[in-house]
Amino acid sequence: MVEKRVVGSSGDEKAEPAKYEMVKEEEGEDRDEEDEAQKPLTDWEAAHVAAESGDLAKLRLLILKRGVLVHVDAEDQHAMTLLQVASRYGHLELVQFLIDNHAAVNATKLDDRAALHFAVICGHISIAEQLLEHGADANLRKRFGLTLLHVVAQTSHTGLVQVLLEHGAEMEVPDDRGNTPLDWEMTIGPGVMVQVLLEQGAILRDRDADGKTRGGTC
């Protein structure tokens, strides 16, 4: 260890450990972290960043010119495809580009959700319509047997009810516990969907799947 000489009150020199070595070690750790952060993204990572940010030019480059490295249905670390990411973040042009390049519209993996689930949850009506017009299944089920109408019943995106019904969604399909979309809306939904669902033909039952009346008693 490097030492520096300090003159004491008696005039004798004393050895004192230098403190800058610890500082140098800390600086070295900081540089390692910076180097890690500055590592270039792989093509796979860059494609998902482009899908999230809406960078169509970048995504086109990676898919069309370097498609050997980035497949159109490449998944990120969360098992989300490029189409699911673009649908979640509302990038209509990217969604159309991926569909045009044969992305799997009904691919499900993460929690059994497809691109259409993300569009519905986030209220992206135009993207939902685009997916449905290109083969998305309006009756896809996710975990617990929830249909897309069950999903939309938990939101305030009223315009999506009509869109799903126009593309073949079935109103009275129950989940794994026997609850319909209207049951879900009346139990845990925000309340704005009740009238919309009733106007679209939902059946108001006296009791839910657990046998409880609408007033909350057994």
Image (cartoon, rainbow, N blue to C red):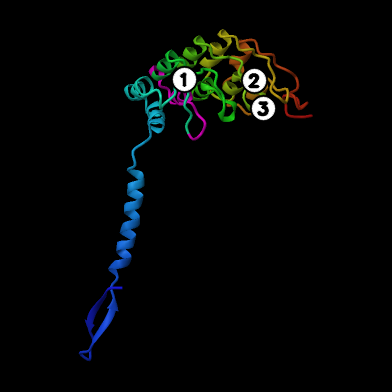
Near mark 3 (Cα within 10 A), the count class, few <14, some 14-19 or many ≥20, is few
Crowd rating for badge 2 (residues with CA inside 10 Å; few <14, some 14–19, many 20+): many
Task: Between label 3 and label 2, give the one nearer the viewer.
Answer: 3
Q: Earlier in the sequence, mark 3 or mark 1?
A: 1
Q: Position of residue 85 (x, y in %)?
A: 46, 26
Quadrant for the N terminus, please.
bottom left
Residue highlighted by disc 2: 181
Please state the horizontal and vertical placement of residue 148, each as a whole percent of the image.
59, 19
Q: Earlier in the sequence, mark 3 or mark 2?
A: 3
- The Cα atoms of the two marked residues, 3 and 2, are separated by 13 Å
Q: Dot 1 surroundings within 10 Å: few (below 14), some, or many (20 or more)?
A: many
Q: Quadrant of residue 166?
A: top right
Q: Residue at x 75, y 19 (%)?
A: 206
Q: Is residue 46 above or below residue 24?
A: above
Q: What mark, if any, has residue 144 been given in the picture? A: 3
CB-based contact (under 8 Å), mark 3 and mark 2: no
